[in-house]
Image: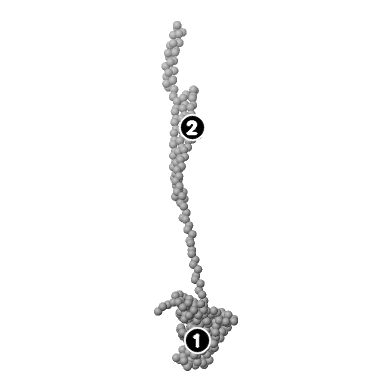
């Protein structure tokens, strides 16, 4: 009994201490929870009009529980891998390159111009087209307008009454059309021209049929402008489908004149309907 009582007393004495110890013992049970959320939003624009938005959400959670130092249980909850949600929203608008339209070019051929004068530049070595009367075809590159040949009228203290002439028969004409007759004429400085103060000299142009001759124009020489070709032209409608074009050297009636004149690049072309009035 005494031993039982001693044990009981001893147990009663130790129980508060044990309880106190248990109460004084620091509670090492710790709960640590960490939760983090990182969100990153990035917006970038592509070249042109493309735009893309990237949203990234990363969530990581971890729980750590510790109970007793001597009797410790560690429970760690951790995802095997971080969860990453990536959402990409892209808006793309294709910008088409401007369409290229090929230019359509229509090339109209120039109308064919028919030349009715044959050997108008006198370059043919054998002349079969011109009738020459007291006129000559000369070969001299510095005196011809173009090329090497031209026709020359010469007066040596003579009267020019139109007997010095050249002519060519032209066919295939239309009396309801208008034609342009043109030529280049020149006064040479050698020989030096000699004339009266009031005398004039001309190239008289005519169209002729076997029964009739019509004067078209008189192209007047300028004695103050030597060694220079001058272009002359006249428009007319032919008397018939076939006429002769005539070029005559004339000076003031009865006057004696000394000169050398050239004629070159004669042309006759159709320029349109007949001019009425």
The number of callouts visible is 2
* Mark-to-mark CA distance, 1 and 2: 122 Å
Relative to 128, say whether 45 is above or below.
above
Q: Residue furthest top?
A: 1
Q: Which residue is mark 1?
A: 248
**Label 2: how many Cα within 10 Å (few below 14, some 14–19, many 20+):** few
Relative to 6, say whether 179 is above or below.
below
At 47% across and 56% down in the image, what residue appears? Answer: 99
**Relative depth, front residue between 19 and 31:** 31
Q: Position of residue 54 (x, y in %)?
A: 45, 43
**Relative depth, front residue between 98 and 43:** 98
Q: Position of residue 163 (x, y in %)?
A: 51, 89
Q: Residue furthest right?
A: 125
The part of the image, by quadrant, that contains residue 144 is bottom right
At mark 2, the secondary structure is loop
Which label belongs to residue 220? none
**Label 1: how many Cα within 10 Å (few below 14, some 14–19, many 20+):** many
Which label belongs to residue 79? 2
Relative to 225, say whether 103 is above or below.
above
At 46% across and 83% down in the image, what residue appears? Answer: 216
Residues marked 1 and 2 touching at CB (< 8 Å): no
**Relative depth, front residue between 164 and 274:** 274
For the C terminus, which image quadrant? bottom left
Can residue 146 be seen here? The reply is: no
Which circle, 1 or 2, is nearer the viewer?
A: 1
For the N terminus, which image quadrant? top left
> First in sequence: mark 1 or mark 2?
2
Q: Position of residue 33 (x, y in %)?
A: 44, 31
At 58% across and 80% down in the image, what residue appears? Answer: 124
Can residue 119 be seen here? The reply is: yes
């Amino acid at each position: 009994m005494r031993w039982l009582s001693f044990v009981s007393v001893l147990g009663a004495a130790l129980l508060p201490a044990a309880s106190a110890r248990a109460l004084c013992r620091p509670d090492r049970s710790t709960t640590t929870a960490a939760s983090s959320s990182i969100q990153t939003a990035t917006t970038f624009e592509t070249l042109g009009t493309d735009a893309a938005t990237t949203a990234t959400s990363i969530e990581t959670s971890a729980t750590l529980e510790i109970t007793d130092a001597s009797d410790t249980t560690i429970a760690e909850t951790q995802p095997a891998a971080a969860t990453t949600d990536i959402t990409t929203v892209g808006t793309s608008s294709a910008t088409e390159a401007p369409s290229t339209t090929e230019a359509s070019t229509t090339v109209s051929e120039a109308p064919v111009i028919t030349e009715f004068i044959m050997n108008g530049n006198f370059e043919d070595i054998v002349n079969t087209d011109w009738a020459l009367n007291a006129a000559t075809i000369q070969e001299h590159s510095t005196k011809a307008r173009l090329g090497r040949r031209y026709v020359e009228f010469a007066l040596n203290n003579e009267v020019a009454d139109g007997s010095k002439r050249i002519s060519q028969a032209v066919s295939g004409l239309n009396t309801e059309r208008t034609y342009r007759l043109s030529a280049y004429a020149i006064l040479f400085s050698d020989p030096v021209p000699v004339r009266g103060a009031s005398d004039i000299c001309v190239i008289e142009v005519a169209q002729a049929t076997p029964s009739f001759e019509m004067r078209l124009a008189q192209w007047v020489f300028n004695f103050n402008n030597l060694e220079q070709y001058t272009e002359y032209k006249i428009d007319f409608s032919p008397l018939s489908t076939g006429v002769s074009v005539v070029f005559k050297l004339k000076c003031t009636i009865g006057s004696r004149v000394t000169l050398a004149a050239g004629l070159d690049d004669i042309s006759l072309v159709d320029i349109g309907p007949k001019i009425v009035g």
